[in-house]
Structure formats: structure tokens, C-alpha cells
Amino acid sequence: MDTAFDQVVSHLFRFRDELLKIPQQIKEQAFDIRIKAGQPVCISGKEGIRYVRQDGTVSRQKSGKFLSCSADELQELFYQLCGQSVFSHENEIRQGYLTLSGNYRVGLCGTAVLESGKIKNIRDITSLVFRIPREKPGCADMLFRPGLDLKEGVLIAGEPSSGKTTFLRDLITSISFGRFGPSSRLAVLDERGELGGGYDLGPGADILRGYPKSAGFDVAIRMLSPEFLVCDELSTADLDAVKQAVFSGVALIATVHASRDDFLKRPLCRSLLDSEAFRNLVFLQGRRNPGQVSAIESVEISLAAERIKKRKPMSGYELSVPEGDEERCESAGGGYDCGERLSAGIVRRETVNKKGEGAA
């Protein structure tokens, strides 16, 4: 059976035979295939970049005879990927990608053509990045643990190539097939064809392909009666759509580009938390362990941890410690990472009313 790597390579007319010879272990850990004019064809994966030789072997060093293409050959490959009709892919191209048959995605690099400050097209293609999709069954199972309510909203954060789409797809299928309880209805906004293309998302998932999030959210809420709205890769342009979804009574599950350390430093992530669409945050480990969870936190815990690290009091809140843990969590300067204590649930958050009494 062909791997996802082999299926992507089938679209690379110019290099297909050589790339199919690459060792299986390299194929299995590959994130993408990169083709750049005047440079060796390379594969990036868990262990870094490997350059592909003409005989199908790979090397970490640029030594020997490598696969490469000229600027003209790269342009011809681009036209072939478009089916010789660039116009029919115009909407995707202006967003920096192409979708191939089988719903594989190719990132485009070139010169942006602007009109009224907006990208109208991309010309003079200089490199193509072929993403290798992955499946990792069961990677989202820990989200079904007791005490975590998915209907309070889930935001999955990770750096590029950390497995956000893989993780989200597994979460969708678990909810749709009812693996941990009754099957639920999901409206999946598959804007770039990466979530549902070639995958069985189950009987509960309705897939809206190619819809911008604002239009897709509106159609889903009005026509599909979902219990969950699911989408990939939120951006600043999607904030209004997210805010509208909050008041629809439908739970939102989405991903965003951000590492755990930088999450609260990104204005987009701050705005997403302010929208109150998400109560649960899932942080992925990163490129070296795609699809693996680093931490699961509530929004309140993440914000409390940040304030403790900055040693600023929380307005309207106090932090209390369960009996027996006073010494371990006595202060932020006592040699303990209070952020980690909060994440582990050692320190709990309680609202405080005007009389100073703990409120439920």
C-alpha cells in the first residue's frame, strides 16, 4: 500500500522515480518535500533536512550529484500541478497554496502581485513545498478524560509541523464515531481540504470544503444544527467569525499557530481568549514529536500562571492551595515553577466576591 509520501510524490512528474527510491524510514518521518530553483531537492523531517541524490539516496551534506531543477523547470512543474490552468486555481494561489488531487497541499513561494494593498496573484514561483499529511490514531484520546468538557471549547496550539491538523482530525473522528460516548454532530470547515480529504471523519461530521470561516460558520449554524464547529488554523481575519460563533450556542474546536511559551505573547491568541470561545487549551510538543500533547490547561490556569510569573496580583481573584501543599507552593520565589504547579492542578483558582469570601 502506498504511503502518504508516495501519494504526494506521484504528483511530482519530474522527480517521481528518484523520490520513490528513498529509504522507508526517511519517508515515514518526513514533514514535507521542498523544491527550489537552482537548489537540491530536500526533505525535512524530525531529524532535520536531507538532500536527495540522483540515485534516490539522501545526505545531510551537499555532496555528490543531487536532484535539482532550473527556474524554467520549476515553472513548468507549477503549471503541471495547476493542470495547465492557473486561472482555475486563482483563489488558492493568492492565499499561497495549491490543493492537489487527494487533497494534498503545496505551499507556494514567489512574488506577490498586489492590488489595492491585497494579494491578487503570485508570479515568478521560486519554490514549492509539498506537505506530507499524517494519521496518528488515538493521539487525541486524553481529551476525553473525566473533568474536561469539550463543549466548553477547545483551542489546540502548536508550532508549524507540530501535528495540529493530525491531532484535530483524530479528535473529530473520535467525537463523530462516538468512541468515548454518544456520537455528536460536527460541522467541519475544511477551508484547504486537509481535514476531510481522503479521510473518513465518521457519520457525525458534515464537511464544508473551501468555505471562508465567516461564511462557513454562518451556513453551518443556520443549516446544519451542529453541536461542534471545527476549523483549522485560525488567523486574525477570523476573529469576528469566532465571536459570532460564541453566541450561537455551538462549541468551537480550532487550532492556532503558537508554541506554549509564546502563546500569550501573540495578540491573536490573546484575542481568542478574550472572545470566551475556548475554555480548554491543548499545547502540542513540537516538530520532533508531532501530534503529542505537552499540556492541557484551562484558560484561567494559563492566565493565572502568567500573572504569578510576573508577580502581579490578580484583580478579583486569589490563589489558594490544597492542604498539605502549602510549602511547595508558598511563593513564586521559593524555587518552584508556579506555572507548572498551576498546570498540574496543585494551585487552584477561586473567584472572590466583594466581601472577600470564596465564591463557587
Image (cartoon, rainbow, N blue to C red):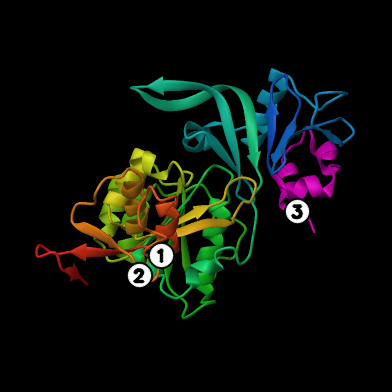
41 in the magenta segment: no
Q: Which residue is mark 1?
A: 346
Q: Quadrant of residue 359?
A: bottom left
8 in the magenta segment: yes
Q: Amino acid at mark 1?
A: Ile
Q: Residue furthest left?
A: 355
Looking at marks 2 and 1 on the same chain, the residue that comes earlier in the sequence is marked by 2
- The residue nearer to you, when weighing 241 against 170, is 170
* Quadrant where the N terminus is found in the figure: bottom right
Residue 226 can be seen in this image: no
Residue 148 can be seen in this image: yes
Q: Amino acid at mark 2?
A: Pro
Q: Is residue 188 above or below residue 311?
A: below
Q: Which residue is mark 3?
A: 3
Q: Residue at x 58, y 35 (%)?
A: 107
Q: Quadrant of residue 38?
A: top right
Mark 3 Cα within 10 Å, few/some/many (few <14, many 20+)? some
* Quadrant where the C terminus is found in the figure: bottom left
Q: Amino acid at mark 3?
A: Thr
Q: Residue at x 41, y 65 (%)?
A: 345
**Position in image of residue 314 (x %, y %):** 24, 51
Say whether residue 339 is left or right of residue 304: right
Looking at marks 3 and 2 on the same chain, the residue that comes earlier in the sequence is marked by 3
Say whether residue 349 is left or right of residue 102: left
Element at label 2 = loop
Report if the CB atoms under discs 2 and 1 are less than 8 Å apart.
yes
Q: Which residue is mark 2?
A: 322
- The residue nearer to you, when weighing 223 against 23, is 23
